[in-house]
């Protein structure tokens, strides 16, 4: 490089650029499509290391030349001989580094998961352009802080959309929002794309979905500008993938398939069988196995081409879809092979994400847990069918099964990789009771997180599962049927809480009170026990007590019942569940509130008598306390 001709330098530059962009001739493109993320990362890292070494040599030589101008003795002791053409080499290395665009380095680093390094390249590009243009050398400026940064024009000519995406990946949301405000453009499509990316990084899936939906509006897309490889088509494909991503996170799985087929139908020729486009296949495959639509999944995974230029996340989605399809087809060898491929894709992503911190690594750790779920339970699907149900229940009730979910962070949208996998396995194993309990827990977490639409969908799914249990079980399985009926009652309670949370208080009370007879509040303890054990109710005493207590709390808060009626309801709850601590605590709070209210409503004369009585009791207690203190001393 330092001794060669101009042709040699051009060859080196072209080789570096081909590695960074994975482009060039047909052979290079084919190699890039089959090369996994780990190999691409190694190739890009070789180029970055070579650039770092050359820059280090350049800076060291320049520093030694400056030192030699100050003291000749230091330069004479240098290890460099006269054979080293220092001036020519410095010039050639400088020219070579300038010919490699920092923007290309940043793009290559971001594609292989080196987000922090990509951000460094973009910052270096902005500073070099600002220094080259001389924008920050005005001696008359006295700006400080943020104004000094803005007036230096460090952001001019930098790919700001890529920078925002990198900041979002590194969880630097404040800087990301600042860039969005600084670079606000009149171009509506660019503004919507930045807004969608920002909301997606902040996990505002509903807002991101609306932004992607507006971005795909036909009124914003000019058909005359379309081309085979145009940037407009790439932006449209990216928006379509983002839209399906948000629908997956929101649990609208049927919409994912409908949207994927609809978007693909616009591209395929009329009269031909519509096939989902390659860039939409991963999301459609995930929606298919989560819905349990195995014929659709079979069509999707068989039409997927491994040589397509999918990113590593898309390859994992397809590989995991093949795993679930193989498990449903009871192909043990293929399950093991697909699990191995899926784990390799995750590890290649995890090795890059681990450089940026645990937060970026966490989703890939959850994907590894999801693979462990399949690996843990896959052996049951190849056992005898007569033993399958009991074996499945034993695994689900084991500590190892529960600990994996307890160690994960709850997701209010219910889109955790572990939960999605467990739901699919329960559906595949025809275990609606297990599936219903998971749907109910997802609905509870979503309601507490304020995602009321997700909570409503989850509770509806749970109700369908338990109704399916009642329809499938025979009369000989009374314990299972009673458990399912009690679970349906719990779902009704959760729906009532959801209605109360969105402001429909009367509807919530009606849902609970319709199944509770008014005569229950007049029953003695023995009558209550006989009522619970009778065939008119299929719920335990504690389950009935929970519903009454919830309705009583709402009535007391809104003042819908008198104090005596509220006391009767609390006493009924304590008779039904005498060991329930929450019932005792809530009743005590109610009595304390009644006492404080009565105390504040007392007239002046009554207050004086009340204070005198307290003083008298205090004087009677003080001598006894003094005597006890003397004895103790």
Image: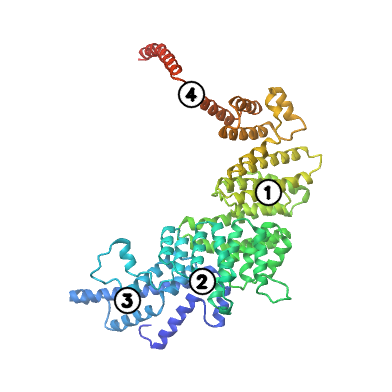
Residue 505 image point, x, y percent: 61, 40
Circle nearer the N terminus (2, 3): 2
Q: Residue 376: in sight, yes or no? A: no
| Secondary structure type for disc 4 | loop
Instruction: For label 3, count other residues whose C-alpha is less than 10 Å away and answer few (under 14), some (14-19) or many (20+).
Output: few
Which residue is at 51% across, 66% downward? 193
* Quadrant showing the N terminus: bottom left
Determine which residue is flagged by label 4.
Answer: 601
Circle nearer the N terminus (2, 1): 2
Label 4 to label 1: alpha-carbon separation: 47 Å
* Eye-nearest disc, 2 or 1: 1
Q: Dividing the picture into quarters, in which one does residue 481 lie?
A: top right
Q: Residue 422: in sight, yes or no? A: yes
Determine which residue is flagged by label 3.
Answer: 133
* Eye-nearest disc, 4 or 1: 4
In the drawing, does residue 258 fall left or right of residue 64?
right
| Secondary structure type for disc 1 | helix
Residue 460: mark: 1
Circle nearer the N terminus (3, 1): 3
Circle nearer the N terminus (3, 4): 3
Determine which residue is flagged by label 2.
Answer: 40
Q: Dividing the picture into quarters, in which one does residue 136 lie?
A: bottom left
Residue 391 vertical placement versus 568 (above, below): below
Contact (Cβ within 8 Å) of mark 2 with mark 1: no
């Amino acid at each position: 490089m330092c001794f060669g001709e101009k042709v040699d330098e051009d060859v080196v530059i072209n080789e570096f650029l081909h590695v960074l962009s994975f482009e060039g001739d047909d052979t290079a493109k084919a190699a890039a499509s089959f090369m996994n993320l780990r190999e691409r990362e190694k190739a890009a890292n070789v180029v970055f290391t070579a650039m770092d070494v050359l820059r280090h040599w350049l800076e060291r030589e320049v520093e030694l030349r400056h030192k030699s101008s100050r003291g000749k003795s230091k330069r004479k002791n240098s290890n460099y001989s006269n054979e080293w053409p220092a001036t020519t080499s410095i010039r050639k290395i400088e020219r070579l580094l300038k010919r490699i665009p920092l923007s290309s380095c940043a793009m290559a680093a971001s594609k292989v998961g080196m987000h922090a390094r990509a951000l460094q390249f973009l910052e270096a590009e902005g500073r070099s352009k600002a220094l080259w243009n001389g924008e920050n050398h005005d001696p008359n400026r006295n700006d400080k802080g943020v104004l000094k940064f803005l007036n230096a024009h460090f952001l001019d000519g930098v790919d700001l959309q890529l920078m925002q995406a990198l900041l979002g990946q590194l969880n630097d949301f404040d800087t990301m929002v600042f860039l969005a405000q600084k670079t606000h453009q009149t171009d509506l499509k660019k503004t919507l794309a930045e807004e969608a990316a920002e909301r997606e990084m902040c996990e505002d899936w509903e807002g991101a979905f609306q932004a992607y939906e507006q971005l795909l509006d036909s009124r914003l897309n000019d058909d005359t500008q379309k081309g085979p490889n145009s940037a407009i088509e790439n932006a449209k494909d990216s928006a379509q993938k983002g839209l399906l991503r948000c629908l997956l996170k929101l649990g609208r799985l049927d919409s994912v398939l409908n949207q994927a087929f609809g978007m693909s139908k616009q591209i395929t020729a009329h009269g031909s069988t519509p096939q989902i486009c390659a860039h939409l296949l991963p999301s459609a495959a995930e929606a298919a196995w989560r819905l349990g639509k195995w014929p659709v999944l079979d069509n999707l995974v068989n039409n997927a081409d491994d040589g397509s230029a999918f990113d590593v996340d898309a390859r994992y989605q397809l590989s995991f879809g093949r795993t679930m399809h193989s498990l449903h087809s009871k192909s043990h060898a293929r399950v093991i092979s697909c699990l191995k491929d899926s784990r390799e894709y995750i590890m290649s992503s995890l090795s890059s994400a681990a450089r940026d911190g645990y937060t970026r690594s966490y989703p890939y750790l959850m994907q590894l847990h999801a693979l462990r779920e399949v690996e843990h339970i896959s052996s049951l699907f190849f056992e005898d069918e007569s033993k399958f149900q009991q074996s499945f229940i034993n695994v689900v009730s084991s500590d190892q099964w529960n600990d994996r979910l307890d160690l994960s962070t709850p997701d209010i949208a219910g889109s955790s990789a572990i939960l999605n996998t467990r739901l699919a396995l329960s559906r595949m194993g025809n275990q609606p009771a297990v599936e219903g309990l998971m749907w109910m827990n997802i609905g509870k977490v979503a309601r507490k997180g304020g995602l009321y639409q997700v909570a409503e969908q989850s509770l509806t799914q749970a109700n369908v599962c338990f109704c399916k249990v009642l329809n499938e079980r025979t009369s000989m399985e009374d314990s299972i049927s009673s458990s399912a009926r009690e679970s349906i009652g719990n779902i009704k309670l959760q729906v009532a809480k959801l209605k109360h949370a969105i402001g429909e208080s009367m509807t919530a009370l009606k849902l609970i009170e319709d199944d509770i007879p008014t005569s229950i509040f007049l029953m003695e303890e023995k009558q209550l026990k006989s009522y619970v054990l009778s065939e008119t109710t299929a719920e335990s005493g504690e389950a009935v007590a929970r519903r009454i207590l919830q309705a009583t709390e709402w009535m007391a808060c809104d003042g819908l019942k008198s104090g005596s009626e509220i006391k009767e309801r609390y006493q009924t709850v304590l008779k039904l569940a005498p060991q329930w601590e929450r019932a005792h605590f809530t009743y005590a709070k109610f009595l304390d509130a009644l006492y404080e209210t009565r105390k504040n409503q007392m007239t002046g004369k009554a207050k004086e008598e009340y204070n005198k009585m307290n003083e008298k009791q205090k004087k009677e207690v003080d001598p006894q306390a003094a005597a006890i203190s003397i004895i103790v001393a």
